[in-house]
Image (spheres, rainbow, N blue to C red):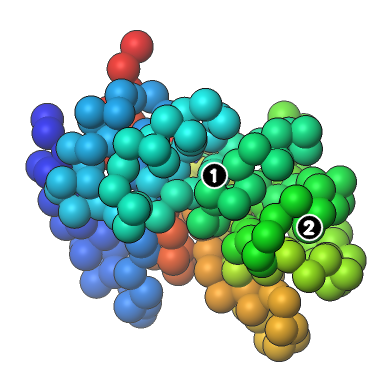
Amino acid sequence: MNVKQNLEEINNNINKSLESVENDTRPNVIAVTKYVTIERAKEAYDAGIRNFGENRLEGFKAKKEALPDDAIMHFIGTLQSRKVKEVVDDIDYLHALDRKSLAKEINKRATRPVNCFVQINVSGEESKHGIALNDVNDFIEMLSQYENIRVVGLMTMAPFTEDEAQIRQVFKQLREKRDEINKLNLEYAPCTELSMGMSNDYEIATEEGATYVRIGTKLVGKEE
Ligand SMILES: *Cc1c(COP(=O)(O)O)cnc(C)c1O
């Protein structure tokens, strides 16, 4: 399937999800291009995609360089502190702010405020990165000392399960936490956005109010 057809199917499914609930927040679709070539990323651009996600430094740089200037570049993976200075000014959105040391390094190296999603480990699985739900308020309060960190929203990964009710519960908890932080009216943490939902659960995420879904396999595919 070409990217255009995949995107049409995804948009149709998003429409159906939005119709099925009392929610008119349409998520931005981020094409996660970590499994595919530059050519395939360009095909996504030509199909109208403007948001691109990569989880590794090399892939991020390669796609950033190859895509036109209006491509919005999302860094969606764990960023090692010692690599921050190499990419921080190329990142439009960082989806995985999950520790103080990273915030400190970004603050030091960036030449402008960086849009960050705080990554939350809602499900509490040990294998997952992210701040525990109970620690989010303290973590975000701590970030106020860093003038180059702007908390645009919260991000999570769904648990490894086929239990849709459980996945929905995780997304709902993230939304509630987003609303809670948003209501604090912090200048450095508007926290309006919700980054959640991947190929297998973007419809549930849409129903639960995602503003960004991160789709790789079902949009651009996966090259082995
Ligand atoms: C790989 C990845 C995705 C996309 O995964 P698919 O299941 O291929 O859609 C989304 N978010 C993050 C953080 C990822 O690492």
Q: Nearer the viewer, mark 2 or mark 1?
A: 2
- Residue 195 position, x and y percent, is 51, 57
Task: Give the residue type that dot 1 points to.
Answer: Phe
Kind of residue indicated by mark 2? Asn
SS class of the residue under badge 2? helix
From where the camera sits, is residue 210 visible? yes
* Element carrying mark 1: strand
The residue sitting at 78% across, 57% down in the picture is: 107
Residue 198 placement: quadrant: top left
Against 20, residue 65 (above or below) is above
The residue located at (86%, 46%) in the rendering is: 101
Q: Which mark is residue 75?
A: 1
**In the rendering, which numbered label is found on residue 126?**
none
Residue 3 place in picture, x, y as percent: 17, 38
Q: Residue at 70% of width from left, 34% of height from top?
A: 83
The residue at which mark 2 appears reads as 107
Image quadrant holding the N terminus, namely top left
